[in-house]
Amino acid sequence: MPATQGKIIPIAVLNAAVAGSALGAHEREAVEHAIAVHALRPGPLIELLHAVQDMLGHIPEAAVPRIADALNLSRAEVHGVISYYPHFRSTPAGRHVLQVCRAEACQSRGADALLAHAGQALGCGSSGHGHGHGTSADGAVTLEPVYCLGLCASSPAVMLDGQPHAHVSANGLDALIAQCRQPEQAVEPVAQPVHAGAGAGPGVRVYVPRDAAALAVGADAVAGALQRECAARGLQVQIVRNGSRGLLWLETLVEVETPEGRVAYGPVTADAVPGLIDAGMLQGGSHALCHGLTEAIAYLARQERLTFARVGVIDPLNLSDYAAHGGWQGLERAARMEPAAIVQEVLDSGLRGRGGAAFPAGIKWKTVAAAAGPQKYIACNADEGDSGTFADRLLMEGDPYTLIEGMAIAGLAVGATQGLVYVRSEYPHAIATLREAIARAEAAGWLGRDVAGSGRAFHMEVRKGAGSYVCGEETAMLESIEGRRGIVRAKPPLPAIAGLWGRPTVINNVITLATVPLILARGAAFYQGFGMGRSRGTLPFQLAGNIARGGLVEKAFGLSLRELVEDFGGGTATGRTVKAVQVGGPLGSYVAPADWDVPLDYEAYAAKGNVVGHGGIVVHDDTADMAQLARYAMEFCAIESCGKCTPCRIGSTRGVEVIDRIVRAGTDPAAHAGQVALLESLCDTMQHGSMCAMGGMTPYPVRSALNHYPQDFGIESTTAAAAA
């Protein structure tokens, strides 16, 4: 604790401390520029702080009074936001920032050992369970743990100065650190969207993805090598930077357009390019890396690609390409419909929220449409922080217009004229792509004052998060958009009645809104034709962690976990036995092996005490320590809790302590009994007493690990069963 804990510090002393560290000329210029750009926008504080940190690398303490005055806030409010969000720094970082993912998917492939290795290599140390952090003595690198980079099928993953790196080994990490320590070797900044336009000229069309997962394994180097090699040989090619098909174990997946269709090659590295061209790749020739026609690859051919039909197929920012593949048809139809009819179409489709809660989307829309008020909003929750989930990122980077189209349809349906997409700061490429897509869509008339000729207005903007997991909860997200700490709001009132800035607000996640254009284009009955029971349509399941064929599988509800993990995923990447599968993110259960054949359906899973959630699936092999994974669930809750309610804030910290005592008890049944009972009581309090799912669902992975894998806690199975 700080030495001042418990003491009253006169305000004059605080003011003097701040005044004693005046802004330099460069810092003052950066702060004033950020204020000029952002101060007049609604809820500007977080965007303004991002702007300052982007320019300076941190937010100087001496900037706080000026920012507070400009926004008519207290200094405490500004300090509170800076200290709340992990993304913000109040002290200078090193020349480079290295973030190592600690989420469960990356843990399954050795992320904690990688973080500890980084801490040792940089002299930052580590504490407890691999929490390396700090800045190296030479000022070259600041090391930070991060709790999901959305590269869950390519673990372990790191991000260096905003650039992703996948399948990182200790040697690979050493190479990145060595690069950072050479001042003349500047690390490339985050790439902005660059697309060779489809049909821009003569030559064979070659597709090289620019999705973050592809960039993390060298897709830019592959594109560059192709361009150079073909130029040297006098071969004409059009290189189109598409999104990822979702076959992430094959990235970089290069596709060549032939008269028979697109032929796939992967995983392609830059040094493999000359040999591929020698083998006739540009004509679809045979090679060890050739997988034949892309659409015939079994992993893709067995899917029902509805929401993701265009992802990996089109140039994400090419408006003509989007239209040629069915884009804007739903919005054009909605523009000719009465608002109530649009809402009814969504109701009839059976579409339920794909963010995890599975609440019927049409009911939210109907509530907002009926609410009175001069201003309404559409808020898209793109704070995809769950380990094992990356579908939102794949779609935003690979087909952003379908999200834009879905939000515009929602606006027409409920009478909203403003839409905001809240995207996590760990997704810089998705943010850049979305912002460019919004600008192009508005210039083309799909957004703006007259949406698709409807005579009605709808505008959109992107808001960037700052590293808080709990902002995935809808009311915490609203607080963050409004420029405050992401603290969960009490309900009622519901956001549909009093949401963003107190106005009626539709809140849906990316996949929910991106599914709407298809429903409007093809009709509710078409979408109802997929799925089972009350779970209609498809869900993009995401296979991650220790899995041989990680990636995205869009299937209708009703297949089993075993089909996904074994048939699509091919078992573990290590070749060892699958031990545990977590479904539904870090707050989801470890599904009992006996339930791996239960149909994936909201009600069927709920009946077993499990959740489908956002469709994230994290696989662990038989080396996994389930007691440590249960401990991590409590630790993660303690780190990410917004702190508003006691069961979550305190319960998670006590949970870590109790699990540690259970593990230390060894195999002594008498020592276990009381601690296991205490853990069960604690979980019950958290589940039923927490304000939101952060504390309320943390017991799911803890209890399921304890009950299905008691031996990892040193407990005989009968002991765990009796405690439950």
Image (cartoon, helix red, strand yellow):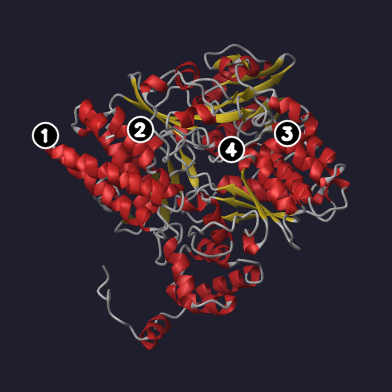
Residue at numbered disc 4: 354
Residue 685: x %, y % from top left: 34, 49
In the image as oriented, which residue stretches furthest toward the top?
286
* Residue 561 visible in rendering: yes
**Mark 4 packing: few (<14 Cα in 10 Å), some, or many (20+)?**
many
Between circles 3 and 4, the one closer to the viewer is 3
- Foreground label between 2 and 4: 4
Tag on residue 668? 1
Q: Earlier in the sequence, mark 2 or mark 1?
A: 2
Q: Residue at x 45, y 59 (%)?
A: 85
As measured in the structure, the alpha-carbon distance from the residue carrying label 3 to the one carrying label 2 is 41 Å
Residue that mark 3 sits on: 348
Lower position in the chain sequence, tag 1 or tag 4? 4
Q: Measure how far apart labels 1 and 3 are at the Cα level.
A: 57 Å
Kind of element beneath mark 3 = helix
The kind of residue tagged 1 is: Asp
Residue 582 coordinates in the image, percent (x, y): 41, 31
Question: Dot 4: what SS?
Answer: loop
138 left or right, relative to 47: left
Label located before the other in sequence (2 or 4): 2
Task: Give residue 106's quadrant in the image.
Answer: top left
